[in-house]
Image: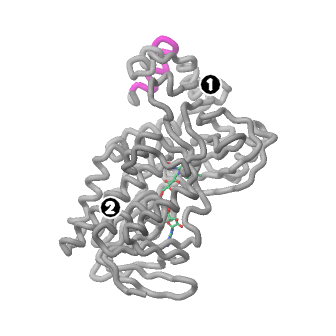
Amino acid sequence: MRDEYDVVVVGAGPAGSTAARAAAEECDVLLIEKRQEIGEPVRCAEGSPGAVLLELLGVTEINKKWISSEINGFRVNAPDGTTVDVTAEMLRMEKPLGYVLERKIFDRDLARDAARAGAHVMVRTRATGLIMEDGAVKGVKMNRLGEDFEIRSKVVIGADGVESQVGRWGGINTTLKVRDIESCAQYHMENVDILEETLDIYLGEKYSPSGYTWIFPKGERAANVGLGVLGSKLNAKRPIDYLNEFVADKLPDGQPVELVVGGVPVSDLLKTVVSDGLMLVGDAARHTEPLTGGGMLPAISGGQTAGEVARKAVRQNDASERVLREYETKWNNNPFGKQRKRMYKAKEFVVERSDEELNRMVRAVHGIQPEELTLKGITMRVLKKDPKLMLMIRHLL
Ligand code: FAD
């Protein structure tokens, strides 16, 4: 086994595999993954917008193996049962609007692409620490099947997900406040009556305090059914308890065939995600979109940029924080980064809303017409239906 690479990537999720592929175009890359199978278990509801995913992957057509359902609309259910439905037709957007993916296959294919680009992939290999010299990261300490060893590198990319330790080991503060993490539980369910091609979202204290509950279709009569509860709202009742109540009320004939639990960061941008020799990407960098908790696309976008910047650092033989900061600056100025402040503000607003306020918000847009689906249209509608609500939401528009 080699004891030195240009770049070591820790974690083979979407962020890490994308970073490894991009870096491997020019560098010697090692991608390590602690699990024995990349992509499993899937800690994700697997929902993704369509056009942006294709753009980030640089393809014009989606690989059919990656999709379990096409999505062409969404429904939001208020606590009192009022709904609002939005479809691709209403938005006058091309179908499909998005997908529910098969991440078991998708994640593995991203890792395969990294391997085909030249990256060396090692599964069942856990990062246990970083090699630090004069405050700079110089490689990764790891354990594989009980054996400890070290691999030196010019650049380390920490793509180790929401429970990331790499950042902390490298001196980057990635601590999340309890109100900046959603604690989630999800079943993959069979034998469920679901809305076809629709992301079905439920709001309210009963099932998901300061979060939301989702039913995302996974083919015929199957769905990812899950919810998130804001960390600061957790008490003796666990997310799985809320989920069991939701399922008993709404999907009594459904059969859970898989359970996953996990956290989703819903924070503002961290002060920094780079240090000498180290870049953090994806959930490790807290890049998840805070209003929806969607993290796959920001992870892929960050992985691509980090891989490119790693190449440059290796070429220049300079992996100082100054050089690696180009990654952070580029990510903060991409569409995900640019919207972050606004999305965090929106999340902070939504998590504070009472059930009655959520009811009023959904009632105001219930029955919305296609021609009203603009900022102006929504503003006019809310002003007409519930002028006082406008005062509450004006700073979001
Ligand atoms: P991950 O996919 O978490 O990958 C990190 C990898 O690092 C893992 O494979 C892990 O095993 C590995 N690793 C960790 N530590 C080490 C170590 N020490 N050594 C080696 N390897 C290590 N996002 C969406 O876009 N759409 C959704 O519908 C959606 N639903 C979600 C539902 C739930 C219940 C949850 C929990 C999350 C959801 N997300 C969703 C978020 C999304 O799953 C993440 O944002 C995304 O997976 C982030 O990708 P990543 O590559 O940064 O991290």
Residue 12's mark?
none
Residue 83's mark?
1
257 lies above or below 140: above
Q: Quick one: label 1, few (<14), some, or many (20+) residues within 10 Å?
A: some
Judged left or right of residue 29, residue 223 is right
Residue in view at x 74 percent, y 36 percent: 193
Q: How many marks?
A: 2
* First in sequence: mark 1 vs mark 2: 1
Determine if the magenta segment contains residue 393: yes
Judged left or right of residue 210, residue 278 is left
Residue in view at x 28 percent, y 58 percent: 327
- Callout in the foreground (1, 2): 2
> What percent of the width, then of the height, locates residue 271?
33, 57
**Residue 75 found in image quarter:** top right
Q: Amino acid at mark 2?
A: Ala
State if disc 2 and disc 1 touch (CB < 8 Å): no
Q: Examine the rendering and report whether any part of residue 129 can be seen.
A: yes
Q: Examine the rendering and report whether any part of residue 232 can be seen.
A: no
Judged left or right of residue 92, residue 216 is right
Residue 306's mark?
2
Query: Which residue occupies the extreme top position in the image?
Result: 384
Q: What secondary structure is the stretch in magenta mostly built from?
A: helix
What is the quadrant of the C terminus in the image? top left
> What percent of the width, then of the height, locates residue 143?
51, 83
171 lies above or below 373: below
Most foreground residue, 380 or 153:
153
> What percent of the width, then of the height, locates residue 276?
27, 71
> What percent of the width, then of the height, locates residue 154?
29, 77
Determine if the magenta segment contains residue 39: no
Q: What segment is highlighted magenta in the picture?
A: 383-394
Q: Quick one: label 2, few (<14), some, or many (20+) residues within 10 Å?
A: many
